[in-house]
Image (spheres, helix red, strand yellow):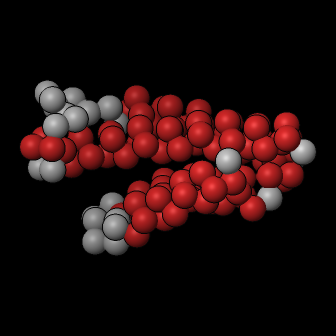
Amino acid sequence: MRILCFVLAALMVLFAAVQYNDPDGPKWMLIYGFPALLALFAGCCPDWYRSPALRGVLLVGMLAAIAGTVYYWPSSDNWWTKEVWWEVETAREGMGMMITLIVLGLVYLAQHRLRLTK
């Protein structure tokens, strides 16, 4: 599970890095950086998630990601096809929020499992 957390952290850092030339890049760097940081914490220091405060931060982040996914949900037809998301910014943003939510969900499951194994 720790390896999964490190892989997820690296993936989200890469997602944040490719936002450097995007007009709203800083916003998306923060959106992708948050799950990267939490995944890194879960991989390095799973005991930190024994703290109710950090678990609360994770849960609030998941709720924000759910709200973001609803807000950015792609309105384009066939938004999952390469022809659409390659050209349509809103489709990419919606998919980015979905990925963020999935990563935070995996971090939640990983930290829960890592806490149980201690």
Question: Going by the image, does 19 lie left or right of 30?
Answer: left
Residue 44 location (% of width, % of height): 75, 62
Q: Residue at x 9, y 43 (%)?
A: 83
Residue sitting nearer the eye, 3 or 115: 3
Q: Is residue 73 above or below residue 38?
A: above
Q: Is residue 39 visible?
A: no
Q: Is residue 58 above or below residue 69?
A: below
Residue sitting nearer the eye, 106 or 37: 106
Q: Is residue 42 visible?
A: yes
Q: Residue at x 48, y 45 (%)?
A: 100
Which of the 4 image quadrants contains residue 77?
Answer: top left
Question: Going by the image, does 47 lie left or right of 76?
Answer: right
Q: Quadrant of the C terminus?
A: top right
Q: Residue at x 84, y 53 (%)?
A: 48
Which of the 4 image quadrants contains residue 18?
Answer: bottom left
Q: How many marks?
A: 0
Residue 38 location (% of width, % of height): 66, 54
Residue sitting nearer the eye, 100 or 25: 100
Residue 41 location (% of width, % of height): 72, 58
Which of the 4 image quadrants contains residue 117?
Answer: top right
Q: Residue at x 69, y 54 (%)?
A: 2
